[in-house]
Image (tube, rainbow, N blue to C red):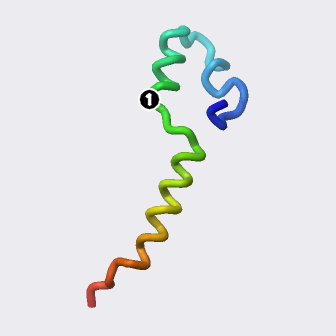
């Protein structure tokens, strides 16, 4: 659902359920991060280069 491979968080030995949820809650969905990077790269064309 988050675009992560199966077991990315739940397959970590010894990680409690609470720790799994915390790790996922603090994460960034990879597709959102990729979209943000594309948006920022597109805006680079609008920034004048210092000479």
Q: Above or below — where is 27 with respect to 48?
A: above
Q: For residue 14, which quarter of the picture?
A: top right
Q: Position of residue 4 (x, y in %)?
A: 66, 35
28 over 8 or under it: above or below: below
User: Disc 1 on helix, strand or loop?
Assistant: loop
Tag 1 residue: 26
From this viewpoint, which residue is outermost toward the bottom?
A: 51
Q: Image quadrant of residue 47?
A: bottom left
Which quadrant is home to the N terminus?
A: top right
Question: Residue 50, image x and y in percent?
Answer: 27, 85
Toward the left, the furthest residue is 51
Rendered position, 19 above or below 27: above
| Residue at left offset 27%, top offset 91% | 51
Question: What residue is drawn where x is 47% and y is 67%?
Answer: 41
Residue 51 lies left or right of residue 36; in this view the side is left
Query: Where residue 24 appears, x then y in whole percent?
Result: 52, 25
43 above or below 3? Answer: below
Q: Picture coordinates of residue 32 (x, y %)?
A: 54, 46
Give the mark count.
Answer: 1
22 left or right of 35?
Answer: left
Measuring 44% from the left and 29% from the top, which residue is drawn there?
26
Q: Residues within 10 Å of mark 1 (few under 14, many from 20)?
A: few
**Residue shown at the point (54%, 8%) measured from the top left:** 16
Residue at the outermost right position: 6
Along the horizontal axis of the image, is 12 left or right of 50? Answer: right
5, 11: nearer the viewer: 5
């Amino acid at each position: 659902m988050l675009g992560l491979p199966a077991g990315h968080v739940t397959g970590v030995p010894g990680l409690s359920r609470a720790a799994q949820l915390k790790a996922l809650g603090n994460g960034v969905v990879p597709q959102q991060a990729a979209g943000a990077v594309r948006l920022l790269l597109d805006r680079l064309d609008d920034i004048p280069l210092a000479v």
